[in-house]
Structure formats: C-alpha cells, structure tokens
Amino acid sequence: MMIFDVLTLFPDMLVSPLQESILGRASKQQLLQVRLHNLRDWAEGKHQTTDDTPYGGGDGMVMKPEPVARALAQLKSKSPRAKVLLMTPQGTPFSHQHACELAKEEGLIFLCGRYEGFDERIRQTLIDAEYSIGDFVLTGGELPTLVMIDAISRFIPGVLGGSDSAEIDSFSDGLLEYPQYTRPAVFKGMAVPEILLSGDHGKIARWRREQQLVRTWQRRPDLLQTAPLSADDLKILEQLQRPVSGTEEID
Ligand code: 4GX
C-alpha cells in the first residue's frame, strides 16, 4: 500500500477531495493511505509560531526551519525510504511521466508551504525533489499536493477500475485524446460522426488516431516532438501541413 504523508498548516483543505470518488474508494480498499499532519503540532511556545519575518527585510513571512525539521525527522523515522517533495513554482514542471514514476515509491512526504515559502536551509537539506504544477502562483502547496496525489494514484495498480483504465488515457501515448460521444445520436442538431455508428472497429480506430493527431497538431504542437509516431501517423501529419488543394503556388 502506498503511503502519502502530508505536512501542512491546513490539513482540513485536503480532507473532502481525498474522501470522494476514486481516491476515496482506493483508500477504503487500502490501495493507498493519506496521513495528514498539522505542522503546528511541531511548533513551540504559547503561540506555536511557524513563521517569521524575512532576514534582510521585505514583504511577507517565511516558514521557520525548526518545526519543519522536527516534523520531517519524525515522519522520516516512520517511513525511512519515503521521498520528501516540495511544491513550488520554482520546481520541475510536474508531468504524467513523474506521476508514473512516483507511483512506484512505497511512500511520499509532501511538504506544503504557505506565505513566501520555507527558509532556504530546509530546501537545501531535507528535500528530495521540487515540483511545479504550472506557471501561476497559488496561496499554498496544498492544492498542488492534491493534484499530485490524484495524478500519482491513478498509476497505483487497482485504483482505476475496468471502466477507467490508465493505459488508454490521454498522454500515455504522448498525444491528446480523441473526441468522445454518447447518446443521443443527434443533440441540438449536431450528429455524432457517422463512422462511430458504423460498427467497423478498424475504421473507428484509424479515425480516432487521426483525430488525436489533428488535435495535438492544432492545440499542442510541442507534444509532437516527443510522441512516438508511426509511418502512418507521419503521413497523416504531412497531409495536415499541406495547403488546401487549389491554393498552392504554381512555379
Ligand atoms: N506549483 N505555490 C507554494 C509557498 C511556497 C513558496 C516557496 C515553498 C516554497 C505552486 C505551483 C504555487 C505558491 C505553492 C507558493 N512554498 N506550487 N507556495 N504553481 O504556486 O506548485
């Protein structure tokens, strides 16, 4: 069973998302366990202070190193092989590939920052990897932690049932997904593509692959640099790049 430890000042932020739907089911089935820890429990003094003003001046607050160091020492003593992860806009862009690899670990410890983040000496000595979930600034590391736990859990065997298999999902083949349709056959005057009603599974598979390539080319051309493409795929992409017949220049 995969153990996720989360160290945060706001453990309640994570409770309901982890109880619902697929993650809730996986917890009940003991495929994973998320243990939430309040950093304040390792703070000292009457006010259990976890932050302080930055040396050198400036706006905002910085999280003090001692409570984090004490908390991580205790969590690591219980999960000695667990990797400690920090979520920050300065981290490595988190991807499908990272989710897949992290799912093979036996434990992960997520350190959630608030304010301007942690004292640099925490980052230097106690963190194994830093990830960013995108180029925007959030109010803390709690939502990135939820995003990462969700994405990682999908790769834990048994978490996705038969109807929600990870293998055939977006990104496992490096391309965007093809469009999906369900009943009714006509909705607000828009018909489902005829080929999907044909029952010809070979044709349907080729149409879906073509849709994946078209969408990826239109929306995320960067992904085509790394996606594994067949000779047939390249032929389809060549046709997309060719100008519409009748508009080509004559020389
Ligand atoms: N992808 N944030 C973390 C506080 C902080 C700052 C520095 C540690 C070091 C974010 C993101 C993100 C905002 C989470 C600042 N903690 N994290 N927080 N985008 O914006 O991961």
Image: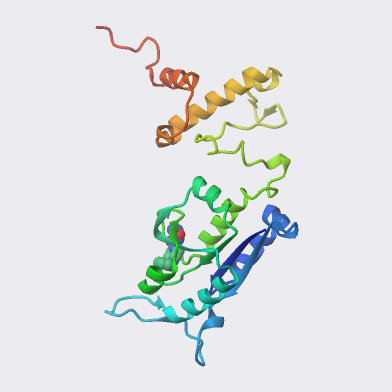
Residue 83 in view in this figure: yes
Please state the quadrant of the image where ligand 1 appears. bottom left
Q: Quadrant of the C terminus?
A: top left
Task: In this rendered view, identify the residue nearer to me: 111 or 190.
Answer: 111
Query: Where in the figure is residue 214, as x and y percent of width and height?
Result: 48, 27
Q: Nearer the viewer, residue 225 or 242?
A: 225
Query: In the image, what residue occupies the spot 72% across and 44% down?
Result: 161
Residue under the image location 53 percent in, 34 percent down: 173
Name, please, the residue furthest toward the bottom: 46
Q: Position of residue 196 (x, y in %)?
A: 66, 23
In the depicted structure, whether residue 91 falls above or below residue 47: above
Position of residue 188 in the picture relative to residue 233 (left or right): right
Query: In the image as oriented, which residue stretches furthest toward the right?
Result: 29
Which quarter of the rendering shows the N terminus?
bottom right
Residue 177 appears left or right of 251: right
Q: Is residue 158 left or right of residue 106?
A: right
Residue drawn at x 63%, y 32% as measured from the top left = 180
Q: Is residue 98 above or below residue 163?
A: below
Residue situated in front as seen by the camera: 159 or 139: 159
Residue that protrudes farthest toward the left in the picture? 251
Which residue shows up at 71% across the image and 59% down it?
27
218 and 50: which one is in front? Answer: 50
**Residue 160 spot, x, y in % from top left:** 68, 46
**Whether residue 64 can be seen here:** no
Image spot of residue 198 (x, y percent):
69, 17
**Is 218 located above or below residue 155 in the figure?**
above
